[in-house]
Image (tube, helix red, strand yellow):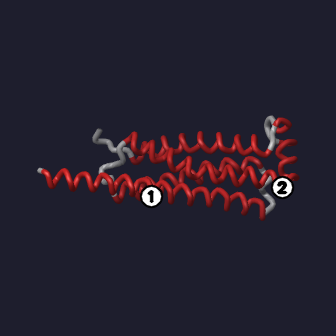
């Protein structure tokens, strides 16, 4: 009986550290993907098509779904506990979005032509600064990540609960 408690405790702590490590790596890879996508669009001279920012939602969805699939295959064969999955998805989102937002804030401070384009063509553009535009990206990212996490959890949740 005592041995089972020790084993269970060790498995639980390994699961938590594995979960956090997975969230960190997934978030950083998603963030690099978001930055990479933006830079590719810039290189192709398509970065001024503001509608392409909605593809960031797809990048988040794919990244979170892959992380859930890895976690599901390694530790949660019957499915991911619902609240734990939501927490994991939101952690991934925060880790992914914050570096991307910082990158966008710095980029918009440097590229004044693009910032002027956003001011002229974006919704409420006249009121935007590089920081507030990055704030809009943050809100879009956090909301998109929450929606994506909810969507992915419908597939990966533990149905035995």
Q: Position of residue 103 (x, y in %)?
A: 70, 54
Locate residue 103 relative to residue 152 in the image: left or right.
right
Residue hosting label 1? 21
Dot 2 or dot 1, earlier in sequence: 1
Identified at 37% across, 44% down, the residue is 157
Viewer-proximal residue, 28 or 64? 28
Which image quarter holds the C terminus?
top left
Instruction: Indicate whether 158 appears above or below 75.
Output: above
Disc 2 to disc 1, C-alpha distance? 35 Å
Quarter of the rendering containing residue 160:
top left
Tell me whether circle 2 and circle 1 mark residues in contact (CB < 8 Å): no
Q: Position of residue 100 (x, y in %)?
A: 66, 53
Q: Secondary structure at mark 2?
A: loop
Residue hosting label 2? 111
Identified at 57% across, 57% down, the residue is 30
Locate residue 32 relative to residue 49 in the image: left or right.
left
Identified at 67% across, 49% down, the residue is 101
Viewer-proximal residue, 117 or 7? 7
Identified at 73% across, 47% down, the residue is 51
Instruction: Indicate whether 87 appears above or below 19.
Output: above
């Amino acid at each position: 009986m005592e041995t089972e408690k020790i084993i269970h405790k060790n498995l639980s702590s390994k699961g938590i550290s594995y979960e956090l490590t997975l969230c960190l790596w997934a978030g950083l890879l998603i963030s690099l993907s978001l930055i990479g996508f933006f830079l590719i669009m810039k290189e192709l001279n398509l970065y001024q098509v503001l509608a392409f920012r909605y593809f960031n939602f797809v990048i988040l969805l794919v990244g979170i779904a892959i992380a859930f699939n890895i976690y599901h295959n390694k530790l949660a064969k019957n499915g991911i506990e619902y609240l734990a999955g939501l927490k994991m998805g939101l952690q991934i989102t925060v880790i992914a979005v914050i570096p991307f937002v910082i990158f966008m804030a710095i980029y918009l401070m440097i590229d004044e032509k693009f910032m002027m384009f956003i001011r002229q063509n974006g919704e409420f553009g006249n009121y935007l600064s590089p920081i507030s535009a990055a704030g809009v990206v943050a809100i879009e990212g956090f909301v998109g990540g929450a929606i994506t996490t909810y969507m992915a959890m419908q597939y990966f949740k533990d149905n035995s609960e």
